[in-house]
Amino acid sequence: MTYPHDLPQGDPQNLQRSLSNRHLQLIAIGGAIGTGLFMGSGKTISLAGPSILLIYMLIGFMVFMVMRALGELLLSNLQYKSFIDFSTDLIGPWAGYFVGWTYWLCWVTIGIADLSAIIYYLEFFNHGQSFGALEGLMISTVAILFVLGLNMVTVRLFGEMEFWFAMVKITAIIVLIAVGLWMILTGFTSSSGAVASVSNLWIHGGVFPKGMDGFLAGFQIAIFAFVGVELVGTTAAETQDPQRNLPKAVNSIPVRIIIFYVLALFVVMCVTPWNQIDPKVSPFVNLFSQAGIASAAIIMNLVVLSSVMSSMNSGVFSTSRMLFGLSGEKQAPNWFAKLSKSAVPANALIFSSICIFIGAFVQFVYKVQTGTNDEVTAFTLATTLSTILFICVWIMIMWSYINYRKRSPELHAQSTFKLPGGVVTCWVVIGFFLATIYFLALDATTLEALKVSPIWLVVLAIGYYAFYRPKYLKK
């Protein structure tokens, strides 16, 4: 049987390689600079203090190892177009089903979280006043339609939009680092009376001001900041010359983590002591506000909004490609594999957008019934659930790599893009992520999302055994 991903390039039923190296590099950067960095880092700093820098470096290293494993797997067989293909081949049909649908839900959940972030940051331009539930629903609807429109045109337009979204984020962070370093070197005194100095990292309770409990509690939002970095893998089927461009994009991740996470937050906490950072306000916006530069704070809010829109844009793109791949493996309805004249999976795009809207509508109903408009709590709950699901996907990637090494040692020997440490690295990464799931139970808010997550496993099991497995056994 021939599936869509088996068809030759240029076939109207197949995805086309429309993304250039320029697009892939910026998609990799955009994936490495997520909404969690801009919106969630304030809360993470309040939980862990300066030790957040160690958290980001540790998580960054583990995620980089996942990306190296992903890169070697995708390049070992160019028929692999996404996680679905190699997990199905190397673990089994159930694994492809689990990874595909779980990754789809990951991005739907992030889309819902991004809507909360969009509403939250637009409140800055509403004189800090919260929007009503109906206003929030209207904003969410416009955002969903805008992103859907961008993805419906062409794959290249998606690449162009991500390129410019990423450029905005990169420019903003570089400017923030430059301004922050100037404030540190000049001993700038903020409006709160704090003097910018490197000593702010240890004079307010030390590097671990809240002990090991605070350090471990900081992992949830910190991990969420990295979700999306594996988006490079989902674009493999639409990337020109993947053997050359994919390794370049993956290998650049560590430098980006050091610059955009570690250095940026280092500057932020040197300028404003960690215990003076409001967990409900982006520390990037706060840095300029502390300096009394009101216009810069406005600009940073616009940057954060563009970052959130970038996340939604990437999310809708990813969900549609997962549904396309699942349909190709007969693990989802056939109509998800249908491409438009622009070679985009239009039905899959529309379905994913509808699911994100349903999530927004559920939030609307909840706000009406409870009379609350706490976008930060809604964001935390949604991001925790997506973090748990992403960890499951990352573990499946490492499991696939372990099986790949057992089954195809000759392909590993021929590889020019090997995972450092091989199978040993895989087990270390898997152990780390399993420990991280335990860390999520330490916070009351993240624990709630952790309790809900097994429901998805039950839904998947029912779907697999009731619908997909009987079809597979008949083949």
Image (cartoon, rainbow, N blue to C red):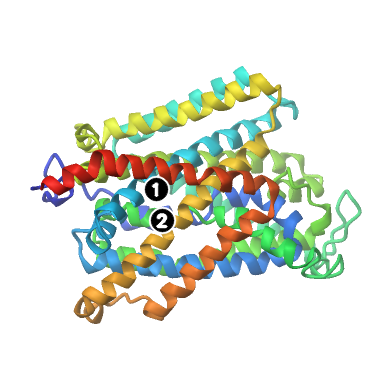
Q: For the point 72% across and 39% down, which residue is it?
A: 295
Q: Position of residue 14 (x, y in %)?
A: 17, 44
Q: For the point 65% across and 69% down, which residue is it?
A: 54
Q: Which residue is mark 1?
A: 103
| Outermost right residue | 193
Amino acid, disc 1: Tyr
* Residue 462 occupies quadrant: top left
Q: Secondary structure at mark 1?
A: helix
CA separation in Å, label 1 and label 2: 7 Å
Q: Secondary structure at mark 2?
A: helix
Precedes in sequence: disc 1 or disc 2: 1
User: Are the residues flagged by discs 1 and 2 in contact, CB closer than 8 Å?
Assistant: yes
Q: Is residue 210 left or right of residue 105?
A: right
Q: For the point 14% across and 40% down, which residue is it?
A: 13
Q: For the point 74% across and 47% down, which residue is it?
A: 279
426 over 377 or under it: above or below: below
